[in-house]
Image: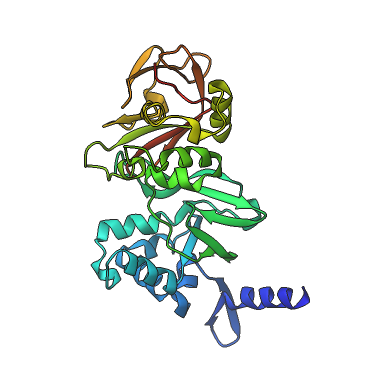
Amino acid sequence: MKKSRILILLLSLSFITCSKEGDDEYLVREKTIFDHVSTSMNYSYLTYALQKTELDVVLSGEDDYTLYAPNNSAFIGYLMRNGFRSIDEVPAAALKQILLNHVMIGQIQYRDFESGYYNTAASSAVNDQPMSIYINQVNMRVTLNGNSRIVQGNVRASNGIIHAVNAVIPIPSLVTFVLADPNLYNLGLALTRSDLTIDFPSVLSTENGSSPAPFTVFAPTNTAFVNLLVELEVDGLSSIDEPTLNSTLNHHVLGEINALSTDLSDNLTLNTFGGEITANISGGASLTDGNSRTCNIITVDVQANNGILHIIDRVILPF
């Protein structure tokens, strides 16, 4: 423990630069976020990417930010997985959004992370609204969008805070959130059941601009699926026949629309892939299926790059 404290102290001291004025007077200037990144050899890829997109200026300013910083190894892995030989091969607009997906406005210390959905500085291709990010904190282990983990936290700067991550955080599709959020684990199991005639993960990964994207997805919680099994008097998801499960899942997806919570109104008919359901907002946002069963929308406006997700407390059933 003593050695750890000494190491933290030395790291903190290394983040301070001095400039001399006159013969004897020294002014101590704390580094900005970009100063920290650009003076570390292990972050040369990130440094170059920030300069190329002019985000170095933003992260050198006075406004406070939280930066999730991928090291060189993380960037190299990202480039290889996506078929790029260098950062210069990544389209400039895409590179900027990728970097902004690692930035949040304001400071979040490591101890303050709580599981849930937050906004990044990136904007969705659907509507230019802030992109969501799912942060999962379990026993002080913090994972971002189910893919990237914080491996060093709380590097403090004059204009924010830096958390080092071990992988580039993916731009989220709707599938990203379903797989990242442990509260949607049962939905993930249902969507990926091997006997389904529709490949839901592939469909819901369709990029914006290609039909049937964008999507609006109503995502039932784990508890909603457990209650469904009780309601149907079956032992598990595998006991639900394929046509019924297929139709059920289709009733949770709207195509060609990114419906924000503010777009909902009373007695609004929504045309899902499986059929009509009805939205209401009086007394709280809710959905009613063709069996007059009602579910509540408990989390709204989780914005992906190809649509939007709302979390519901009951599974919608077909007629």
Residue sticking out furthest to the bottom: 23
Pick the quarter of the image with the C terminus: top left
Position of 24 with respect to 193 (left or right) is right
Q: Position of residue 75 (x, y in %)?
A: 39, 69
Work out whether 7 lies above or below 112: below
Asked if residue 159 can be seen in this view, the reply is no
Residue sticking out furthest to the right: 2
Q: Position of residue 287 (x, y in %)?
A: 45, 19
Residue closer to the observer: 235 or 101: 235
Asked if residue 308 can be seen in this view, the reply is yes
Q: Position of residue 49 (x, y in %)?
A: 34, 67
Position of 138 with respect to 3 (left or right) is left
Q: Quadrant of residue 16?
A: bottom right
Residue lying at 45% horizontally and 55% vertically, measured from the top left: 103
Residue lying at 26% horizontally and 32% vertically, measured from the top left: 256
Q: Quadrant of residue 86?
A: bottom left
Residue closer to the observer: 91 or 29: 91
Residue lying at 59% horizontally and 46% vertically, measured from the top left: 115
Count of numbered tags: 0
Residue closer to the observer: 313 or 60: 313
